């Protein structure tokens, strides 16, 4: 039963890379979106700090 | 009646709504994807012609539909930005492009993996495959054009124009299997009349589709927050927003 599941009726070499690549794309999207938002927050913080120091 | 539309033109409002939506969208997407994966891989019966190879549908179809949805969102946001001069529209378009491009690559790769055992080849210059490849080139073109200008406003306008012109490819991708002779099978879910699949195969597919769409919504909101901050970093409201 378990070996039948993993062999996917002889199509394992196509089915598992298909799902594996989907996980890579989902993971990349989540990671890159978080990184993009964090970088934007850091840039905005720096810009605000610079504006505050210039005001003084 | 149009109050909600005008509110969407306000960067702080959009930033707040996006921040509030992310955890909900991600949570429901995770549940939908988990159900779709388990039911699709372990409980759906094998197809009478394709055997277990048909299970690639649970990734391929949602990613292909998402590639078209993300482009339509990008083009609609670009049109809103150009017609009503709403800057948030450009931010939505810029946020949607890399997500849509990545899911177009996923649709092409998974389609290629599915094509090898079914058609005997990883690639054919078939109308559906070729128009989907053109969709990827359009995404790359829009992203490149946006970053090609020193003045970001000019880059936004040029990318918006290309996105709007390129939206003509979306119905071409969808109807290519109807308009031309194609190796690719016809529509499975998005078609007039009842879907062609039995419920035990269809429900996991619908769940995966829902999961992909909600996941897209979540990462779109996260990228949109970044886009809005990049464009508004001198504004006073940003100080409060980045503290929270």
Image: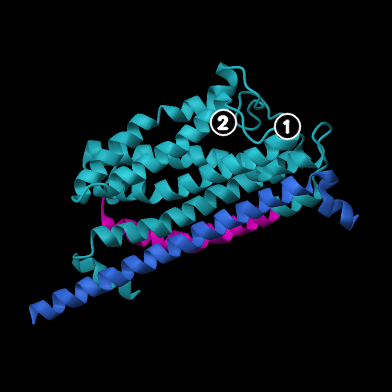
State the residue position of label 2. B129
Main secondary structure of the magenta stretch: helix
Q: Specify whether residue A17 is painted magenta.
A: no
Residue at 50% across / 29% down in the picture?
B131
Q: Tell how many labels.
A: 2
Where's residue B61, x and y in %? Answer: 62, 39
Where's residue B27, x and y in %? Answer: 57, 61
Chain A's colour is blue
- Tell me the distance, in whole angstroms, between the alpha carbons under discs 1 and 2: 15 Å
Foreground residue, B221 or B113?
A: B113
State the residue position of label 1. B120
Chain represented in cyan: B
- Disc nearer the start of the sequence (1/2): 1
Quadrant, the C terminus of chain B: bottom left
Residue at 61% across / 56% down in the picture?
A23
Decide: few, some or many residues near mark 2? Use Cα within 10 Å; few <14, some 14-19, many ≥20: many
Start-end of magenta stretch: B8-35
| B128 with respect to B89 (left or right) | right
Foreground residue, B126 or B210?
A: B126
Residue B72 visible, this orientation: no
Q: Chain of mark 2?
A: B
Residue B226 visible, this orientation: yes
Where's residue A28, x and y in %? Answer: 52, 59
Residue at 46% across / 30% down in the picture?
B170
**Helix, strand or loop under label 2:** helix
| A9 with respect to B221 (left or right) | right
Query: Could you confirm whether marks 1 and 2 are on the same chain?
Result: yes
Q: Chain of mark 1?
A: B
């Amino acid at each position: 039963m378990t070996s039948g599941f993993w062999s996917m009726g002889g199509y394992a070499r196509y089915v598992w890379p298909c799902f594996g690549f989907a996980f890579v794309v989902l993971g990349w999207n989540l990671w890159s979106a978080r990184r993009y938002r964090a970088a934007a927050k850091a840039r905005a913080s720096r810009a605000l700090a610079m504006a505050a120091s210039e005001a003084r | 009646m149009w109050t909600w539309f005008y509110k969407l033109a306000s960067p702080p409002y959009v930033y707040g709504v996006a921040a509030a939506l992310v955890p909900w969208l991600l949570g429901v997407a995770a549940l939908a994807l988990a159900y779709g994966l388990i039911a699709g891989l372990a409980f759906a019966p094998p197809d009478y012609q394709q055997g277990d190879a048909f299970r690639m549908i649970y990734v391929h179809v949602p990613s292909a539909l998402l590639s078209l949805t993300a482009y339509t969102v990008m083009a609609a946001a670009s049109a809103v930005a150009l017609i009503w001069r709403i800057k948030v529209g450009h931010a939505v378009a810029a946020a949607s492009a890399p997500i849509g491009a990545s899911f177009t690559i996923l649709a092409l790769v998974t389609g290629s993996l599915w094509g090898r055992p079914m058609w005997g080849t990883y690639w054919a210059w078939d109308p559906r495959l070729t128009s989907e490849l053109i969709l990827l080139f359009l995404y790359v073109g829009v992203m490149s054009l946006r970053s090609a200008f020193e003045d970001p406003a000019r880059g936004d306008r040029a990318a918006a124009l290309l996105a709007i012109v390129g939206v003509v490819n979306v119905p071409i991708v969808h109807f290519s299997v109807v308009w031309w002779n194609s190796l690719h099978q016809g529509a499975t879910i998005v078609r007039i009349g009842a879907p062609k699949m039995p419920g035990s195969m269809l429900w996991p597919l619908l769940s995966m589709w829902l999961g992909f769409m909600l996941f897209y919504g979540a990462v779109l909101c996260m990228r949109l927050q970044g886009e809005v901050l990049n464009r508004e970093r001198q504004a006073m409201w940003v100080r409060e927003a980045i503290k929270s």
